[in-house]
Image (cartoon, helix red, strand yellow):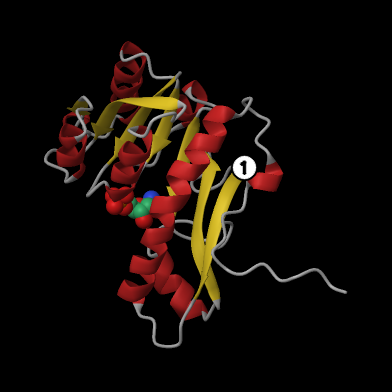
């Protein structure tokens, strides 16, 4: 059984979705630790509610030494016997050290259809760009922020009267379905051989094949 560690910085709603999924019978992984870099982050309550150990490793006392902060996180993950890490709204840029330690074993969820709109404020940028489809992506973490092999995506139409908040809310609903489903498939899979046929979770209707 895989032992999953979660890194989060905020309200932790994606972590909550992972915790709920992992509590179900037959889920192929156990969430054994949740770490945040932000004291008092909302997600701590979710971890407590699910009986999952949580830890705050505040980045501020490390005074800009990202490497030292990441070494502390890495040590805590190893101490808990973690075998796979899920970033769930973890708002620190990672250095090659932590990415390298968890190469192929660290996933992230991003609120856009990558490679479009990496980085912040994805919903506002999607609206500004006038895209008609927007969504979210679960990918393997590599050295470049919001890059790395795409495991699964969910797409929704952008509606004419959408604003940043309405779009964000509809995407978040998709995130909460996409991340647990992708994690489950990833854990069932042989590492590095994720089934590409199963990699699209898309609420849009799939057009029938051409006659
Ligand atoms: C989500 O939109 C996630 O895709 C992004 O950061 C946000 C975190 O939200 N990486 P939450 O803390 O999971 O509610």
Q: Nearer the viewer, residue 146 or 96?
A: 146
Per the image, the residue denoted by label 1 is: 149
Residue 206 lies, with reference to residue 182, above or below; the image says below
Residue count near mark 1 (Cα–Cα under 10 Å), binned few <14, some 14–19, many ≥20: some
Residue 38 lies, with reference to residue 55, above or below; the image says below
Q: Is 63 placed left or right of 120 in the picture? A: left
Kind of element beneath mark 1:
loop
Q: Nearer the viewer, residue 122 or 68?
A: 122
Residue 63 lies, with reference to residue 146, above or below; the image says above
Instruction: Report x, y in % for residue 10.
Output: 23, 47
User: Under 8 Å from ligand 1: the CB of mark 1?
Assistant: no
Instruction: Report x, y in % for residue 154.
Output: 53, 59
Q: Nearer the viewer, residue 21 or 167?
A: 21
Q: Is 27 placed left or right of 92 in the picture? A: right
Instruction: Report x, y in % for residue 144.
Output: 53, 43
Number of marks in the rendered image: 1
Work out which quarter of the rendered image holds the C terminus and state it: bottom right
Q: Residue at x 61, y 53 (%)?
A: 200
Q: Residue at x 28, y 44 (%)?
A: 16
**Image quarter of residue 56:** top left
Q: Quick check: can you spot residue 91?
A: no
Residue reaching furthest right? 211
**Image quarter of residue 189:** top right
Instruction: Report x, y in % for residue 143.
Output: 53, 37
Q: Nearer the viewer, residue 38 or 167?
A: 167
Q: Residue at x 43, y 33 (%)?
A: 95
């Amino acid at each position: 059984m895989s032992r999953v560690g979660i890194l989060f910085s905020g309200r932790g709603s994606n972590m909550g979705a992972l915790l709920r999924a992992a509590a179900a019978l037959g889920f192929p992984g156990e969430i054994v630790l949740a770490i945040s870099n932000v004291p008092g982050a909302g997600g701590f309550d979710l971890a407590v509610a699910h009986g999952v150990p949580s830890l705050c490793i505040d980045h501020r006392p490390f005074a800009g030494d990202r490497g030292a902060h990441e070494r502390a996180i890495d040590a805590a993950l190893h101490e808990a016997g973690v075998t796979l890490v899920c970033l769930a709204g973890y708002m620190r840029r990672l250095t090659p050290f932590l990415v390298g330690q968890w190469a192929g074993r660290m996933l992230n969820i991003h609120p856009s259809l990558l490679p479009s709109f990496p980085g912040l404020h994805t919903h506002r940028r999607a609206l500004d760009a006038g895209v008609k489809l927007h969504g979210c992506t679960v990918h393997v973490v590599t050295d470049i922020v919001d890059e790395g092999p795409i495991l699964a995506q969910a797409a929704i139409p952008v509606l004419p009267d959408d604003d940043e908040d309405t779009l964000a809310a509809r995407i978040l609903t998709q995130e909460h379905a996409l991340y647990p489903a992708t994690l489950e498939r990833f854990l069932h899979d042989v590492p590095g051989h994720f089934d590409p046929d199963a990699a699209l979770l898309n609420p849009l209707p799939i057009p029938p094949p051409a006659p």
